Amino acid sequence: MKTLEIILIAFVAIEHVYILYLEMFLWTTPKGMKTFGLKSKTFAEETKTLAANQGLYNGFLAAGLFWSLYTKDISVSLFFIICVCVAALYGAYSTKSNRILIVQGTPAFLALAVILLRMFLKI
């Protein structure tokens, strides 16, 4: 793996560990509520189990990306980066918020572009 790929993949993985933390542990706090645009503490409390489950999935994405760095297997990196890209697209679509696409999607799409570029150019 090349240095730029490693940096971008690691960044996406770390970002998803942070999303896990926000969704699993800070959902009902002012920081979590502000981050996710939650309107009330009651709603946050009612949905915290769903958010924790969502956070766990983000953790699996991060684990897969870290695993791909450990094994240096670009096909594993490609799979998990594509998963993140799809999640960002669907998140933006389903919430009608481009913020998800920018925050979650931009680093993943950059990583995807670098991976594909190297794969196709064989550099």
Image: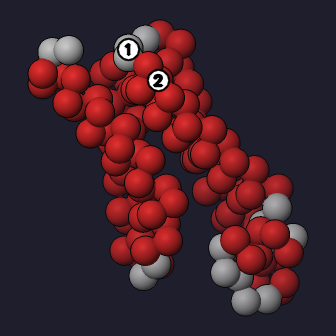
Q: Amino acid at mark 2?
A: Ile
Residue linked to disc 1: 1
Disc 1 packing (10 Å; few <14; some 14–19; many ≥20): few
Residue 59: x and y in percent read: 62, 41
Q: Decide which of 28, 13 is in the foreground and name it.
A: 13
The answer to whether residue 36 is above or below residue 110 is below
Q: Is residue 84 visible?
A: no
Task: Report the number of discs.
Answer: 2
Residue occupying the far top of the picture:
71
Residue 28 image-quadrant placement = bottom right
Q: Which residue is depicted at the point 66% across and 73% down?
A: 36
Residue 123 picture location, percent across and down: 20, 14
- The circle on residue 73 is none
Are the residues flagged by discs 2 and 1 in contact, CB closer than 8 Å?
yes
Secondary structure of the residue carrying tag 1 is: loop
Residue at the farthest bottom position: 39
> In this image, 108 relative to 15: left or right?
left
Give residue 6's mark. Answer: 2
Whether 70 is drawn above or below 86: the answer is: above
